[in-house]
């Protein structure tokens, strides 16, 4: 981690020092640092709106944009996406310098103006997303493995909603105890999906209390190749036998992926 980034993280921890304001979610020499900031910003009628901002600083940050996820119990998912897009636009003007504190201050000062703007259509969302994928152009595919789902119905609905909101296609696949999520779409949207998956209380623990997903693994990620099928929608499927699951992968042009990663889960 570069010294300016280390100093920025130390400063952020000192600034957001209140209860639950700051939390480092993960650190990695290869994937960078993911952390969460809880703050408030003035919204409609001068009322404070709580914001949960998750930032992913890649190893080459600040030479590249941070990953950003926005959540709030008082905003719709569409509004959260719009706020995220505006933050990414602002981040582009701050490239090459540590920027997180400035971004938080900016959204605190500008949230009300963003929410007062007319709803952005899906076309505008697509345009804005494409400007934030400087190094990640094209369609990507990722395969995730979940250890279990206790609150299955709620969990499935949440995954379907995230896929829809982030314009991701693919499959949520169940076969016996094996649970796989195959996602296809914009790489930055796939990254945001992972942030949501790891930071949201999407399941329940053994006592029935809401909990975050701690047992998810990324089995595979690559740019979509010519032999790969383009999924037109996100579907939930159940398979009664291994050969049915294998056929799904083979039809999608992912025979090698099945052999290398899925078979290992069966053994």
Image (spheres, rainbow, N blue to C red):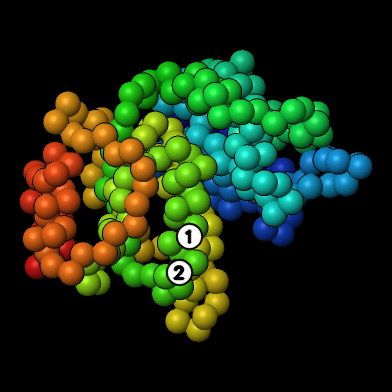
Residue 106 left/right relative to 170: right
Q: What residue is rendered at 55% in x and 37% in y? A: 68
Q: Are marks 1 and 2 in contact (CB under 8 Å)?
A: yes
Q: What residue is rendered at 59% in x and 48% in y? A: 36
Quadrant containing the N terminus is top left
Q: Report the number of numbered marks.
A: 2
The image quarter in which residue 201 lies? bottom right
What is the x, y in percent for residue 177?
25, 72
- What's the CA distance linking mark 1 and mark 2? 6 Å
87 versus 168 height, above or below:
above
Furthest-bottom residue in view? 207
Q: Which residue has dot 2 on it?
A: 153
Secondary structure category for the residue under label 1: helix
What is the x, y in percent for residue 136?
37, 24
What is the x, y in percent for residue 257?
14, 45
Quadrant containing the C terminus is bottom left
The image quarter in which residue 215 lies? bottom left
Residue 119 left/right relative to 45: left
- Pointer 2 local density, CA inside 10 Å: few below 14, some 14–19, many at least 20: few
Q: Is residue 211 visible?
A: yes
């Amino acid at each position: 981690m570069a010294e300016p980034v280390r100093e920025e993280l130390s400063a952020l921890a000192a600034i957001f020092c209140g209860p639950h304001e700051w939390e480092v979610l993960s650190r990695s020499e290869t994937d960078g640092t993911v952390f969460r900031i809880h703050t408030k910003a003035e919204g409609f009628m001068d009322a404070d709106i709580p914001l949960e901002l998750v930032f992913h600083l890649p190893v080459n940050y600040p030479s590249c944009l941070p990953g950003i996820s926005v959540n709030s119990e008082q905003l719709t998912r569409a509004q959260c996406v719009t706020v995220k897009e505006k933050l990414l636009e602002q981040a582009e003007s701050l490239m090459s310098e540590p920027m997180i504190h400035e971004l938080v201050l900016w959204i605190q000062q500008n949230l009300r103006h963003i929410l007062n703007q007319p709803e952005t259509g899906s076309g505008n969302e697509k345009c804005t997303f494409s400007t934030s994928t400087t190094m990640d152009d094209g369609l990507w595919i990722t395969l995730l493995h979940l250890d279990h789902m206790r609150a299955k119905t709620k969990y499935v609905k949440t995954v379907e909603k995230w896929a829809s909101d982030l314009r991701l296609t693919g499959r949520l696949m169940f076969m016996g105890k094996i649970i796989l999520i195959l996602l296809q779409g914009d790489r930055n949207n796939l990254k945001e999906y992972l942030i949501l998956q790891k930071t949201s209380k999407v399941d329940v623990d053994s006592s029935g209390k809401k909990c975050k997903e701690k047992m998810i693994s990324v089995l595979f990620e690559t740019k979509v190749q010519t032999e790969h099928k383009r999924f037109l929608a996100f579907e939930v499927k159940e398979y009664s036998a291994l050969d049915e699951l294998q056929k799904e992968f083979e039809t999608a042009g992912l025979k090698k992926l099945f052999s290398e990663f899925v078979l290992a889960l069966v053994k």
